Image (tube, grey):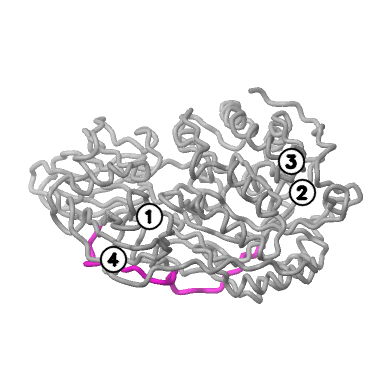
Amino acid sequence: MTLSPTTKPAGRRGAILSYPDGRLRRDGDPHRVLAGSLHYFRVHPAQWADRLERIAAMGLNAVDTYVPWNFHERHRGRIRFDGRRDVERFLGLAAAAGLDAIVRPGPYICAEWDNGGLPAWLTGAPGMRLRSTYQPFLDEVGRWFDELLPRLAGMQASRGGPIVAVQIENEYGSYGDDSAYPRWVRDALVERDITELLYTADGPTDLMLDAGTVSGELATVTFGSHAAEAARLLRSRREGEPFICAEFWNGWFDHWGEKHHVRSPRSAATVLTEILDADGSVSVYMAHGGTNFGLWAGANHDGHVIQPTVTSYDSDAPIAEHGALTPKFFVLRDRLQAVTGSPHRPLPAEPPLLAPRSVPITRGAGLLASLTEISEAIESPHPLSFEELGQASGLVLYRAHPRLPRGTQELTVRGLHDRAQVFVDGTPAGVLDREADSLHVDGTGDRVRLELLVENQGRINYGALLGQGKGVLGGVQIGRRLVHGWAMYGLPLDEWSRDDVRRAASATAPAGAPGFATARLTVDEVADTFLALPGFGKGFVWVNGFLLGRYWEIGPQVTLYLPAPLLWPGTNTITVLELERFGDRIELRDKPELGPAEEYVEIFP
């Protein structure tokens, strides 16, 4: 696909949303978009209808969702729109709930989602340049859009569907200034029959709006505070356009090792009122956060350290991770009703929960032995990255047999992304990460079995480091000498089938502190619950072969949400891969524990 000429889009005369006089109209009538963000890829599909009903019960008239490319095309050419990926079914359920839909197809989405939604096979391609008019990148985006956009086009309001608006890229002004690129994305949408309202979304600063907006298309802003200032800035730059907050951050996400971010209902309601008082439209981000199931949680980088995002994406949203209606839900619902005057819709019932209990664990295969049993080695003179191994996420076990000179030696792993457990002849020698990439080991002059169990903790989803590789990107040194002769065992945990999980847990005899363990949970009727792993260190949990996600004792997240649809009446199998040390039981709790809280409000300088 070649770069399209820069032209004002045509053919959208029939869009249901318009702003001919500077005020938003729906089918010609004055209108205000009151949307809530809910990501279908963070909710079990059996719960989509329930969560959409809760969005509507809050007094919102639309739902907005991203579409993560990597969720649909994990491997190049193998595109899926079934099951959890059936975005058309999700949009149909939104329509059935009486909601309009706003779709944000990227190709980049951020969203605290692994790699910002871009596939690892794409960002890992040699020489690839992202989010620009670099032709190989545009060719891949065009191919993806050829698959996705016809599905969305058929669900536009002009064809009887719920889609009333589609976003152009995502906060591009926070990333680059190749102004031809967002114009190309706009044209790519139009050329594939997207006829509803198109818009851009950027932070409320001149720097971000300079690069992210597209002439002739509606510009919106994203923020969590200072709504009046954002409205003034946008109107000063975009005369004749309505004020829309495309993301109102009424809560925030969490990183491992930090506190759980919350925002009081009063604080959130105050800024929502400012938006509405400025005659604005809004999308509440998130209205329902959901869960980063599997290994889909992304990461940030603050310029010094990587900040992996936790499994929960609760985000202190009005509708909690398990669907409960929080105090914030009712406060924001009242503020919305003051504007719309519409009567409250009936409230869905609170989700049922299993009674608390503990279940004992049974030790399974030991860590290192099992991982080499269930994966075939790939050999190379040099350590290969995840991308070179064709693996997006999970773990890679690197093994070599260097000679360790007598005495204390410094072992260094150059370009480690992100975390490595180091073993010498099967004995733990320490843990390395990006910032602390060396440790000391004692040698006798003999060869040793050196093993590095490297974890991808989530691909960076925002900023200039987007697309950075994973694994050992440099070399491994003993002193000044590079180690050669590597065997690598790929462990894409989130691609394992139920049989793979069962085989891994029983691949070898129990040995040592870390490894696999299982627990049996028997239930008469299924319901939601929350898993806690007291005494465990760090690892991963599957339920009936479905990877819930990571746990880590550093917190803040303590419990993992286990939705009812993942269980079945009778005996259920919980499988744990523990990297450090086992506890003796798994606990089922009747409420989430997301860690010590701190009030957090995102403020732009």
Provide the residue designation for mark 1. Answer: 435
The reply to whether discs 3 and 2 touch (Cβ–Cβ < 8 Å) is no
Image side of residue 1 versus residue 314, left or right: right
Alpha carbons under labels 2 and 4: distance apart:
49 Å
Snapshot quadrant of residue 329: bottom right
Q: Nearer the viewer, residue 249 or 387?
A: 249
Provide the residue designation for mark 3. Answer: 160
Alpha carbons under labels 1 and 3: distance apart:
53 Å
Q: Is residue 302 above or below residue 382?
A: below
x 57%, y 49%: residue: 110
Snapshot quadrant of residue 482: top left
Magenta highlight range: 580-605
For mark 3, does the 10 Å Cα neighbourhood hold few (<14), some (14 to 19), or many (20 or more) residues?
few
Q: Position of residue 36 (x, y in %)?
A: 65, 58
Provide the residue designation for mark 2. Answer: 219
x 69%, y 30%: residue: 192
Instruction: Tell me the mark number nearer the camera, choosing from 1 and 2.
Output: 2
Provide the residue designation for mark 4. Answer: 586
> Does label 1 or label 2 sit earlier along the sequence?
2
The reply to whether residue 26 is in sight is yes
